[in-house]
Image (cartoon, rainbow, N blue to C red):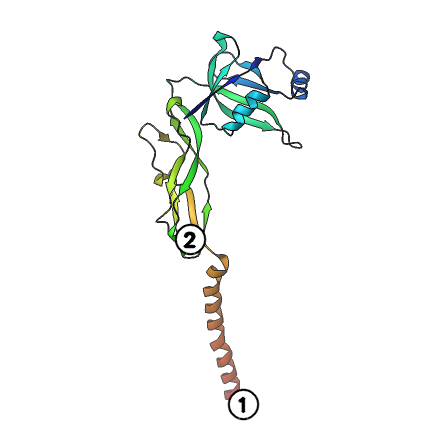
Amino acid sequence: METVSVKVNLKEIVGKSAAKKIRKNGDVPAVVYGKGENIMIILDKDALRVLRDVNFSESAIINIDTGKEADKVFAIIKDVQYDPVSDKIIHIDFMRVSMTEKIHVHVPVVLIGEAKGIKAGGDVEQVLREIEIEVLPTNIPDKVTLDVTDLDAGHSLHVSNIAVPDDVKVLTNKEDTVVTILLHKQEAETPQADENAAAAEPKVIKEKADKKDEKAG
């Protein structure tokens, strides 16, 4: 688990015009929701830089400092909204957390090792890149890993194959596929094409033989 601190300003005025003015100044409006009253805040460039450093990860604990002792909270990032045209961040949602209560978060799945299937001419396809877990905020892992070393071509590994600490509960369906090794398309189709050609050739020879028999008769 990674913990970072950000200093923010309270957003005194609500509404679209106020949010537009905040963005015009290069800042981003945000909200911290959860138990208790929602807190409307403003993130400046320094605060956004800190959040970028943790890749806006849901697995990072954010210590939000508004300058008021009563408003200091721990939270996680639940949603980041981007402008569809400029791709700039326009709003961030935080969820307040208690360090003594378990929460649901998503963490990335990282593959380790070189799969056997690659040496056999296969390609690695990672189907699932994150899983949902239940855990105390203090024990959130930055990632979970899955060893693919023994994975052969044509085979898959599933969520059930991911090892997690005892204090972490996996919520994602254990039967969901995480990674599979696919054969190259051309290699997979070649044997079938050869079989079709082999099956068709005797038929042509037989047809010619039948025609010769008809003429002879």
Q: Is residue 136 visible?
A: no
Residue 175 relative to residue 49: left or right: left
Q: Which residue is mark 1?
A: 215
Label 2 Cα crowd, 10 Å radius (few <14 / some 14-19 / many 20+): some
Identify which residue, 159 or 80, lies in the foreground: 80
Q: Position of residue 216 (x, y in %)?
A: 51, 92
Residue 213 relative to residue 155: left or right: right
Residue type at tag 2: Ile
Which quadrant of the view contains residue 178?
Answer: top left
- Which part of the image, by quadrant, shows the N terminus? top left
- Given the current orientation, which residue lies at the most extreme left position? 166
Identify which residue, 102 or 173, lies in the foreground: 102
Check the image and report above or below for 68 versus 90. Answer: above
Check the image and report above or below for 105 versus 100. Answer: below
Label 1 Cα crowd, 10 Å radius (few <14 / some 14-19 / many 20+): few
Q: Which mark is residue 135?
A: none
Q: Is residue 90 visible?
A: yes
Q: Kindly state the secondary structure of the residue where label 2 is placed.
A: helix
Check the image and report above or below for 190 versus 157. Answer: below
Q: Position of residue 100 (x, y in %)?
A: 37, 17
Residue type at tag 1: Lys
Q: Which residue is mark 2?
A: 118
Residue at (40%, 22%) from the top-left corner? 137
Q: Position of residue 88 (x, y in %)?
A: 63, 29
Q: Kindly state the secondary structure of the residue where label 1 is placed.
A: helix
